[in-house]
Amino acid sequence: MYYNCTTMASFSETQVTFRLPRRLAQRVNRLARRRGRKRSEVLREAVLVYVEMTEGTELERPFDRVVDLIGSVRSGIPDLGSRHSEYLKKRLGGGG
């Protein structure tokens, strides 16, 4: 999917600044050079594609992946909820 980023930039109203991990920035730079485009154009296109792909969909959080497991594992320790700190210290060798 190709977007004319020059046209997109003409109606740009907001500047956004963010940091990229070094390796990702290097990949973006290489891609921009290969395409003969500015890095900002490549990033604008990437953001637009991402937004269009995910707009209107629920993004899954890590918590959502395990919510059905919470509270479903039995430890066999009847007072674990109220004395969890003591058990944790004991397990980690901190006494208790």
Image (cartoon, rainbow, N blue to C red):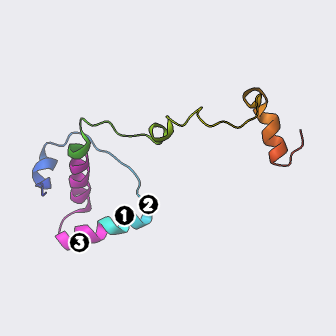
Disc 3 crowd rating (10 Å Cα; few below 14, some 14-19, many 20+) is: few
Please give the residue where the numbered disc 3 appears in the rendered image. 33
Query: Disc 1 designates what residue?
Result: 25
The disc, 3 or 1, on the residue closer to the chain's N-terminal end is 1
Q: Residue at x 76, y 34 (%)?
A: 77
The residue sitting at 23% across, 52% down in the picture is: 44
Q: Which residue is mark 2?
A: 21
**Left or right: 22 as drawn, with respect to 10:** right
Magenta-colored span: 29-50
The residue at the point 30 percent across, 68 percent down is 29
Q: Does residue 17 appear left or right of residue 80 in this picture?
A: left
Q: Amino acid at mark 2?
A: Pro
Q: Which of the 4 quarters of the picture holds residue 39? A: bottom left
In the foreground, 64 or 45: 64
Above-or-below relation of 52 to 31: above
Which of the two marks, 3 or 2, is nearer to us in this view?
2
